[in-house]
């Protein structure tokens, strides 16, 4: 049998104790355990009746049993304060429902809702499409493009294109020829290129 109660009296030799109004004898292997238990402690005992005597085969402090019990999984909780709910019928506990408290917004959802279109970094809101770093990089590339574009059509730009065309035409003609000496091939190509360049500029 198993009962729970407070030790009222304990014998000095730890061979017996009184629980409530009844005396209980201790089996020899339980004596070391009883030595660590004090008068007034609440215990849970397992005993067997032998005639008019009771012999305890197991004794445990009541609070030790409570600590050993695994915590029950709370299946339903208040979405506001996290208090346990009896079932899933309601999403809020009585207190939060009466006070009108609302579910706190998740900062994680807010931070991942808007992302940089270049690197995917989280943005605070949808005001900008790029993060600070990618936005700064885009501005730098844009200004460089504008700077390069401003040279388009300039005398330097036109001259470079004329030389390129002349060299290209000369190389095409030279590639159809056979040269035994690379230096001769080089001189032939440069002469042709100079002639083509003169002709191109004369067409303006």
Image: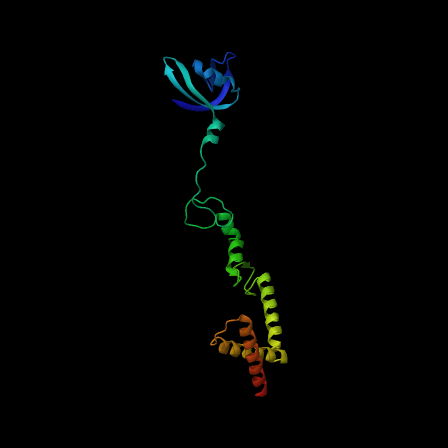
User: Is residue 45 rendered to the left or right of residue 156?
Assistant: left
Nearer the observer, 130 or 185? 185
Q: Residue 88 at what x, y percent from top left?
A: 41, 48
| Residue at 57% over, 77% down | 190
Residue 80 position in % (x across, y down): 51, 50
Determine whether, in the image, residue 159 is placed left or right of residue 5: right
- Closest to the observer: 107 or 184? 184
Q: Residue at x 44, y 13 (%)?
A: 28
Which of 20/44 is in front?
44
Extreme-left residue of the structure:
51
Residue at image coords 46%, 28%: 65
- For the C terminus, the image quarter is bottom right
State which quadrant residue 195 falls in: bottom right
Q: Position of residue 161 (x, y in %)?
A: 57, 78
Q: Residue furthest bottom?
A: 203
Residue for point 38% across, 18% down: 48
- Farthest residue to the top: give it: 13
Where 139 falls versus 84 (above or below)?
below
In the image, is 30 to the left or to the right of 146? Answer: left
């Amino acid at each position: 049998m198993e009962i729970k109660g407070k030790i009222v009296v304990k014998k000095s030799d730890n061979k017996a104790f009184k629980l409530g109004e009844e005396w209980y004898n201790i089996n020899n292997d339980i004596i070391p355990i009883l030595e660590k238990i004090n008068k007034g402690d609440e215990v849970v005992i397992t005993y067997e009746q032998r005639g008019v005597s009771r012999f305890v085969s197991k004794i445990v402090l009541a609070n030790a049993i409570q600590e050993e019990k695994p915590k029950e999984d709370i299946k339903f909780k208040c979405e506001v304060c996290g208090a346990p709910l009896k079932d899933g019928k309601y999403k809020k506990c009585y207190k939060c429902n009466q006070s009108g408290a609302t579910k706190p917004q998740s900062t994680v959802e807010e931070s991942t809702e808007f992302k940089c279109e270049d690197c995917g970094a989280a943005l605070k809101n949808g005001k900008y499409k790029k993060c600070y770093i990618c936005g700064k990089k885009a501005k730098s590339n844009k200004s460089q493009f504008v700077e390069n574009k401003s040279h388009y059509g300039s005398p330097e730009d036109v001259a470079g294109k004329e030389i390129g065309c002349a060299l290209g035409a000369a190389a095409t003609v030279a590639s159809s020829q056979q040269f035994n000496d690379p230096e001769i091939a080089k001189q032939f190509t440069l002469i042709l290129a100079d002639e083509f360049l003169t002709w191109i500029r004369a067409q303006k």
